[in-house]
Amino acid sequence: DTAVSQTPKYLVTQMGNDKSIKCEQNLGHDTMYWYKQDSKKFLKIMFSYNNKELIINETVPNRFSPKSPDKAHLNLHINSLELGDSAVYFCASSQGYQDPYQPQHFGDGTRLSIL
Amino acid sequence: RKEVEQDPGPFNVPEGATVAFNCTYSNSASQSFFWYRQDCRKEPKLLMSVYSSGNEDGRFTAQLNRASQYISLLIRDSKLSDSATYLCVVIGNTGGFKTIFGAGTRLFVKA
């Protein structure tokens, strides 16, 4: 199936721990994104990479570090997790500069809960 | 003023009703417009693109008014399964391509 897939689907961990979320897309897209959706349901862009290069870095604590080993993968590492990091994290991809006016396609989310 | 604004609702409608959502955007240079649907605890999914000439997909009709900078989504003959949050999405180019998501409009369709 062509898709954006992210793992894990659920992540429950203690405050202060370090965790990673992985994302892969097989749509041949150049651009990938990370979004955070908190309890208020607003979808907030965190990062965007085009062909492995960072192009958007919104005001996000530097405890969050994205890494793109190739254009099909964008992983998110979070250090020293805090209670406020509890949210759903969505990965997405789009054609990017190939055709910048095309819509984004989303993975099914990682539900992060900090105890 | 937010770049993309939607009425958060919720809209509570009976089955079979017609319901319309509006969305306004602030960047007149915006070029692409979409409606997404997000079910509870799921990812946003593309519902339909929005074209200047208006476009229809079954019970759903989307319209774009560039002069007034708003887009709309009309749902006819609402079904229980239409209950979801509908997100308005705009892509523009202001010193770089940017996709802006509205905060969403919540719809509840009741039997």
Image: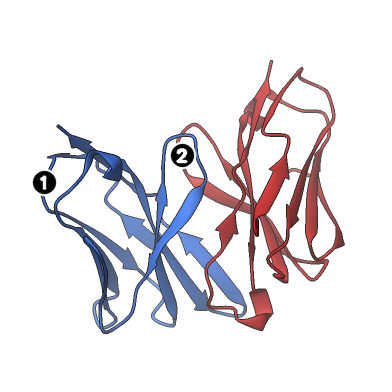
Chain colours: A red, B blue
Q: Position of residue A11 (x, y in %)?
A: 71, 27
Residue B30 image-quadrant placement: bottom left
Q: Residue at x 72, y 26 (%)?
A: A82
Image position of A113 (left or right of B68): right
Q: Quadrant of residue B106?
A: top left
Q: Which residue is mark 1?
A: B16
Which of label 1 and label 2 is nearer to you? Answer: 1
Q: Secondary structure at mark 1?
A: loop
**Chain of residue at mark 1:** B
Question: For mark 2, does the 10 Å Cα neighbourhood hold few (<14), some (14 to 19), or many (20 or more) residues?
Answer: some
Residue drawn at the location 73% of the way across and 34% of the way down: A8
Q: Is residue A56 above or below residue A11?
A: below
- Location of residue B53 by image quarter: bottom left
x, y (%) of residue B65? 25, 78
Q: What amino acid type is highlighted by mark number 1?
A: Gly
The reply to whether residue A65 is in sight is yes
Q: Read off the residue under disc 2.
A: A41
Residue A90, position as x, y percentages in the image: 62, 46
Q: CA distance from mark 1 to mark 2?
A: 27 Å
Task: Answer above or below: position of B33 versus A66.
Answer: below
